[in-house]
Amino acid sequence: MSTKHTRLVVVGGGVIGLSCAWRAAADGFAVTLVDAAPASGASWVAGGMLAPVTEAWPGEEALLELGVASVALWPEYAARLGEAAGQPAGLRTEGTVVAATGSGDRAELDALAAHLGRIGRPVERLGGRELRRLEPAIGPEVRGGLSVPDDLAVDNRMLLAALRAAAEKAGVTFVARNAVAVTGTTVTCDDGEEIAADAVLVAAGARSAALHPALDGLVRPVKGEILRLAHRPGAFPAPVRTVRALVDGRPVYAVPRDGGGLVVGATQADVGFDTEPTVGGVRDLLRDVERVLPGVAEFALLEVAAGLRPGSPDNLPLIGGLGPDGPLVATGHHRNGILLAPVTVEAVLALLRGAQVPPVARVADPARPTARSTGRRETAR
């Protein structure tokens, strides 16, 4: 496909849609992005972990390999974005630690470490004292954990600002409306306007399924709640590294921000398009993060929010074409939209050029049998 005058319409202005729009425009496509509120939704609420190893799960080795390939692309992606935007992309390279409180949590982390070792992804196991020497903000209830220096993080809101700036500088046209239907060459907006294109890319996150019949049942909303905390004078310093933890079997994470801030998450629930934070979700997050990082009790609570991750039946994203006449899709990234942005962009650009997608991304083909057959629903972990 020649890119000289090719018209591309991207539906969705989260991290995936903005990334693809920016890079396609920089490559010569005439790009229109359709979204009533770009740089919002799940991308705005996200913690920003780039953590394929510490989020690994037995049976999801293809997702792990896709994530490892993408996190390796992140430094170059962030540098290129920062240069294009004229502002930082927010990448943090201090690494990640995983903490366990009780003996059951420690046993689960040991099982994860053993699994990772068997598949060639060894991690360093640490006792409680060793973990506190590495990350002093961790409290005495932590009995041990893992060090994973190659799992990174990014400030999601700095990232979104940089993506919007880079897209605008590259010439992307923003249409402040919502799409209600798409074909391979047309996007219908909620005011009835139709936007014609040579190619359409659906990157509308949890709302993608309503846009095309072939996506029905392939993408669903998965609610997650987060807290944003700010360091106050006199409080114990926030961690420098991302801290993931198991507390009596419940997962919690704390991702640092500049100035001592933290983003704490994440609950997970299949409750449709409900975006109201709950008292129980806030209570559980505060209780669990304080057991791991006791100093946060003195922090300020700035924000409570909930977002909708775009889940898929097998937890792999959907990146590819919906048949010979359908649109392209880049959705269903679940917890990993920000992590998988670089590898998703490379796959989408290849598709737009009529080339083969990178081999590691072929597992995300929407036509794969497991995309419909598994019926799996992930529980919190």
Image (tube, rainbow, N blue to C red):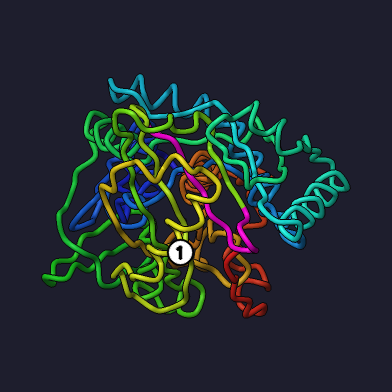
> At x 53% / y 57%, what residue is drawn?
320
Instruction: Indicate the position of residue 162 as horizontal and vertical percent values.
Output: 30, 32
- Residue closest to the eye, 156 or 362: 156
- Residue closest to the eye, 150 or 231: 231
Q: Residue furthest left?
A: 191
Vertical placement of residue 152 versus 379, above or below: above
Q: Quadrant of residue 117?
A: top right
Quadrant assignment for the N terminus: top left
> At x 75% / y 61%, what residue is drawn?
104
**Is 128 on the left-hand or right-hand side of 155?**
right
Q: Number of callouts in the render?
A: 1
Q: Quadrant of residue 220?
A: bottom left
Q: Residue furthest right?
A: 118
Instruction: Indicate the position of residue 134 as horizontal and vertical percent values.
Output: 64, 27
Residue 353 in sight here = no
Q: Residues within 10 Å of mark 1 (few under 14, many from 20)?
A: some
Q: Write the start and end of the magenta stretch as one range.
A: 246-257
Query: Is residue 250 on the magenta stretch?
Result: yes
Q: Secondary structure at mark 1?
A: helix
Q: Which residue position holds label 1?
A: 284
Query: Is residue 216 on the magenta stretch?
Result: no
Vertical placement of residue 291 versus 26, above or below: below
State the predominant SS element of the stretch in magenta. Answer: strand
Instruction: Indicate the position of residue 255 as horizontal and vertical percent values.
Output: 46, 40
> At x 32% / y 75%, what residue is drawn?
274
Residue 276 in sight here = yes
**Amino acid found under the numbered disc labelled 1:** Asp
> At x 68% / y 35%, what residue is drawn?
148
Instruction: Indicate the position of residue 169 as horizontal and vertical percent values.
Output: 23, 28
**Is 99 on the left-hand or right-hand side of 59?**
left
Quadrant assignment for the C terminus: bottom right
